[in-house]
Amino acid sequence: MVIIEDNVEVCGFIKDLFSEMFRVESAYNGNEGWNVIRKVSPSIIISDIMMPEMDGMELCRLVKSDKRTCHIPVILLTARTAVTYKYEGLETGADDYIHKPFSADYLRHRVKNLILQRKLIQEHFLKSSLFKPEDLTVTSMDEKILLKAVRHIEENIADPKLNVDSLSREIGLSRVHFYRKIKSLTNLTAVEFIRVIRLKRAAQLLEKGSLDISEVRYAVGIQDAEYFRNSFRKQFKMTPREYAEKHALL
């Protein structure tokens, strides 16, 4: 978690609320906060709006327009009460907008809800992208990044040299930022993400029954037979042969 708040006492109060739940970093203006966010890629951001150097609105715009950070939930805090200010905050891409003063329980509740929503999004992205990537409704930068990654893997799935480095270059992110992005969207590491897509395609090919197991393995870019067998069994709770035989009976 990153807290950006120019009031030292308020910053300390929020930090104490979440110190047992998160590793908390803090900053006292928007520029400093943006540097910290890019460095640590937090699970959630809580930022005041009225700050020196860069306000919370501009900070939120930066977070939500950068593909390295656009997946991170942002809560904006403000003492302003006009409805137009709230709309302005939400239009920047903020995930929530909380008026000061607020209770500790209320802020904890809002953070808990946003983390839960992120987990639900992970499940949705994972299921959609690994079963039917063409069914993803592309409405956000995160979804576009995920869809581009899935399509690149699908198009190069027979290439055993396809790896995290080549995939991250295709997406336009560093290896570190790509790892963080995929982990945040699917709760898989980047290596697991590639492997699971290979195995899902292998299962589809086995269901068709037109290729033998060795041909399927090479078709999804896995050269090591034992690795393929063990990975497939871990993913589907049965060996490739058992899977093929099961579907041959259907």
Image: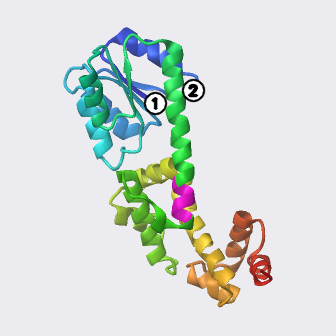
Residue 222, quarter of picture: bottom right
Q: Earlier in the sequence, mark 2 or mark 1?
A: 1
State which region is magenta.
125-130
Residue 200 counted in the magenta span: no
Q: Is residue 69 left or right of residue 16?
A: left
Secondary structure under tag 2 reads: loop
Residue 165 visible in rendering: no
Q: Is residue 204 left or right of residue 53?
A: right
Q: Quadrant of the C terminus?
A: bottom right
Residue 126 counted in the magenta span: yes
Q: Which of the pair 178/149 is nearer the observer? A: 149
Secondary structure under tag 1 reads: loop
**Residue at figure coordinates x 30%, y 13% from the top left:** 79
Task: Give the image location of residue 168, x and y in percent.
Answer: 40, 62
Binning the other alpha carbons within 10 Å of mark 2 as few (below 14), some (14 to 19) or many (20 upward) gives few
- 72 is higher (above) or lower (below) than 198: above
Binning the other alpha carbons within 10 Å of mark 1 as few (below 14), some (14 to 19) or many (20 upward) gives many
Marks 2/1: CA–CA distance: 9 Å
**Residue at figure coordinates x 48%, y 54% from the top left:** 182
Mark on residue 21? 2
**Residue at figure coordinates x 63%, y 81% from the top left:** 205
Q: Quick check: marks 2 and 1 in contact, CB under 8 Å? A: yes
Instruction: Look at mark 1 in the image and give the residue it sits on.
Output: 1
- Disc 2 marks which amino acid? Met
Task: Give the image location of residue 32, x and y in percent.
Answer: 28, 28
Q: Looking at this rendering, what residue extends furthest in the front direction? A: 83
Residue 132 visible in rendering: yes
- Disc 1 marks which amino acid? Met
Q: Is residue 127 left or right of residue 53?
A: right
**Residue at figure coordinates x 36%, y 44% from the top left:** 70
